[in-house]
Image: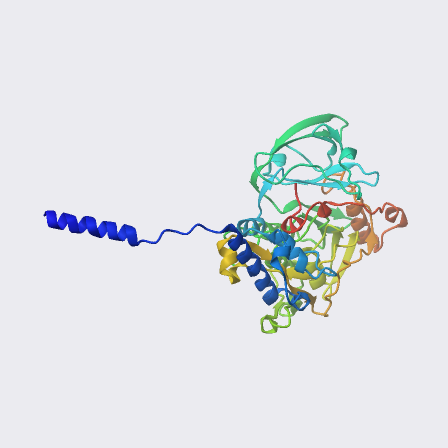
C-alpha cells in the first residue's frame, strides 16, 4: 500500500511539474492581430478594396477605429464602421438602450421631440412628439451649439443608468421638468398608422421609423409591418403615404417585405434590385425579385422624406420607382446607394475578440440600373418639417402637402414657401451603427 501511495504521489508531482504554465496574454500582440484581421477582411470584402493601400503600417493607428478610418475610400464612403457582434445583432431587432426619443428643429431653431419609442424610459414617462425641449440639465439649448453649427447635448453614451434632466414646453403652453434614466428597452418601428379620408378616397398614413426585424422569425421579417399592412388592406386603402422622415435604415429583408406588400400583383416575379460586390466577389452578386404579399392595390405611393431618410428607406423608393408612380414630399434623402453585411463570421480573430467589422460590401441598383444616388433622391416637393405637430395631424405641413397632392395632383406655392433646410438633423448626431438607428 505504501508503495502504491508513493507511486501516486510521484505521478502527481510529475504531472504538476510537466504541465506547461499558461503564458500571459500579450495585449499588444492581440491588438496587432485584430488590426491585421480588420485589414484582411477589408481587402477581401470591401466594395472599394482596390483603393486600400498596398502596404499599411499598423503601428501608425492607435485604435481599430482609426485604422478603419485610415483605409476607407473617403470620396464616397461615409458609412463603414466597427461595433460589437452583440450591438449589431441587437440593433437590427430593436433591442436598444437609452432614453428612447428623437429630435428635430423648426425653422426658428426651436428643438422638439420628433418621436418616442413606446417602451423606452421616455415613452413610459409619457413624452410625446411636439413637446419643445427648452433646457437640458438646466442649460438652454443654445449653450450646446458647437463651433461647426451642430449641437452636442452631452447626454452620455447609451449605457443604462445615465440620468439627464429635461425641461419641456408643452403644446398647451405649460412647462414640465423631467429627470429620465437610460435603460434597455424594445423599440417599435411603427410610430403612427391611421386612415385619413380625402374626399372619396381612403388614404393610409404610416409613420415608419426604422426597418427592424422581429426576433425569432424565420425568414427574417417584421411582425409590425405585417400587422400594419393587414390593417391597411382590411380598410381598403386607395392611396398610401409612408412617412420615412426620421428613418435611417435597417434590415434589407424588412425593406423587401414592405416592397412586396406595396407592389402590384402584376409585377410579381419581376426584378426588385440587384447587389453588386467587388471585382473579386462577382460570383456572389445577387438579385431579388418581387413576390407580392396580400392584395393592397396601388398605382402610386407617396413618401415623406428628409435628409434623415437613408439606406433601406432609399432602397424601397428606388426599387418601386420603375413599377409605380413614386412621389417624394419633404426634403432630399441622405444618399446611401450601397449596403453592408458584418464580416466577423469570416475571421476567427474578429469573432474571438468580439470585433464586428461592417464596411460597405455591395452597391444596389434597381431594375432600371439606377445605382448612383450618393447625393440622395431629390424631393418632388420641398416642404418644411413641423415637429411641433402630433403624428397624423393634418396641420403637419408635410402630411398636408401629401394630402393636397392626392386631392389636386400638385402642391401649391404657399405650401412650398414653408421649406427650410435644417443646418443639423438627428442623423448628423451619430456615426456608424447609431446613424442607421438614430435615437437618444
Q: Is 266 drawn above or below residue 95 in the view shown?
A: below
Quadrant housing residue 170: top right
Left or right relative to 187: residue 428 = right
Q: Which quarter of the picture shows residue 109?
A: top right
> How many numbered markers are drawn?
0
Give how far across and how far down residue 346 sits, in percent: 52, 62
Image position of 282 with respect to 156: above or below: below
**Residue at 75% in and 36% down:** 144
Residue 45 is situated, as x and y percent measured from the top left of the image, at 60, 65
Residue in the image at 73% along x and 47% along y: 428
Is residue 176 rendered to the left or right of residue 355?
right
The foreground one among 17 and 272 is 17
Q: Is residue 211 left or right of residue 348?
A: right
Query: In which quadrant of the rendered view does residue 72 lie?
Result: bottom right
The one of 296 and 219 positioned closer to us in this rendering = 219
Q: Quadrant of the C terminus?
A: top right
Q: Residue at x 44, y 50 (%)?
A: 24
Colouring used for the render: rainbow
Taking depth in this image into account, of 181 and 71 the one nearest to the observer is 71
- Can residue 282 be seen here? yes
Q: x, y (%) of residue 202?
A: 72, 50
Above or below, 54 relative to 27 = below
One can see residue 218 in this view: no
Name of the residue lying farthest toward the bottom? 283
Find residue 306 and report its horizontal and vertical position in percent: 76, 50
User: In the picture shown, does residue 143 fall above or below 205?
Assistant: above
Q: What residue is drawn where x is 75% and y is 41%?
A: 104
Amino acid at each position: 500500500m505504501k508503495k502504491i501511495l508513493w507511486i501516486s504521489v510521484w505521478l502527481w508531482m510529475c504531472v504538476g511539474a510537466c504541465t506547461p504554465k499558461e503564458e500571459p496574454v500579450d495585449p499588444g500582440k492581440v491588438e496587432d492581430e485584430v488590426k491585421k484581421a480588420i485589414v484582411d477582411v477589408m481587402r477581401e470584402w470591401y466594395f472599394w478594396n482596390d483603393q486600400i493601400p498596398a502596404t499599411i503600417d499598423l503601428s501608425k493607428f492607435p485604435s481599430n477605429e482609426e485604422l478603419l478610418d485610415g483605409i476607407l475610400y473617403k470620396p464616397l464612403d461615409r458609412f463603414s464602421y466597427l461595433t460589437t457582434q452583440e450591438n449589431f445583432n441587437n440593433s437590427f431587432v430593436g433591442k436598444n438602450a437609452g432614453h428612447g426619443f428623437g429630435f428635430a428643429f423648426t425653422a426658428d431653431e426651436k428643438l422638439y421631440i420628433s418621436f418616442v419609442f413606446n417602451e423606452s424610459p421616455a415613452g413610459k414617462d409619457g413624452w410625446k412628439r411636439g413637446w419643445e425641449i427648452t433646457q437640458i440639465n438646466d442649460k438652454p439649448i443654445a449653450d450646446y451649439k458647437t463651433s461647426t453649427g451642430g449641437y452636442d447635448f452631452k447626454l452620455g453614451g447609451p449605457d443604462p443608468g445615465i440620468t439627464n434632466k429635461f425641461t419641456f414646453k408643452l403644446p398647451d403652453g405649460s412647462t414640465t421638468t423631467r429627470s429620465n434614466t437610460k435603460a434597455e428597452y424594445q423599440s417599435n418601428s411603427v410610430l403612427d398608422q391611421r386612415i385619413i379620408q380625402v374626399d372619396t378616397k381612403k388614404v393610409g398614413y404610416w409613420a415608419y421609423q426604422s426597418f427592424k426585424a422581429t426576433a425569432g422569425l424565420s425568414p427574417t421579417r417584421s411582425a409590425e409591418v405585417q400587422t400594419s399592412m393587414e390593417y391597411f388592406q382590411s380598410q381598403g386603402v386607395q392611396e398610401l403615404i409612408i412617412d420615412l422622415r426620421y428613418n435611417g435604415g435597417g434590415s434589407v429583408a424588412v425593406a423587401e417585405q414592405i416592397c412586396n406588400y406595396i407592389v402590384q400583383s402584376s409585377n410579381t416575379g419581376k426584378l426588385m434590385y440587384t447587389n453588386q460586390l467587388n471585382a473579386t466577389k462577382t460570383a456572389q452578386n445577387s438579385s431579388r425579385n418581387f413576390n407580392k404579399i396580400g392584395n393592397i392595390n396601388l398605382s402610386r405611393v407617396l413618401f415623406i422624406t428628409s435628409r434623415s431618410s437613408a439606406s433601406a428607406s432609399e432602397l424601397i423608393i428606388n426599387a418601386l420607382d420603375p413599377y409605380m408612380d413614386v412621389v417624394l414630399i419633404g426634403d432630399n434623402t441622405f444618399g446611401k446607394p450601397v449596403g453592408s453585411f458584418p464580416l466577423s463570421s469570416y475571421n476567427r480573430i474578429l469573432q474571438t475578440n468580439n470585433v464586428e467589422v461592417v464596411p460597405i460590401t455591395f452597391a444596389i441598383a434597381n431594375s432600371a440600373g439606377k445605382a448612383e444616388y450618393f447625393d440622395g433622391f431629390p424631393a418632388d416637393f420641398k416642404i418644411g418639417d413641423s415637429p411641433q405637430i402630433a403624428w397624423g395631424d393634418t396641420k403637419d405641413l408635410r402630411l398636408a402637402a401629401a394630402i393636397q397632392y392626392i386631392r389636386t395632383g400638385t402642391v401649391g406655392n404657399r405650401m412650398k414657401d414653408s421649406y427650410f433646410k435644417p443646418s443639423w438633423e438627428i442623423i448628423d448626431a451619430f456615426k456608424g451603427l447609431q446613424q442607421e438607428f438614430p435615437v437618444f
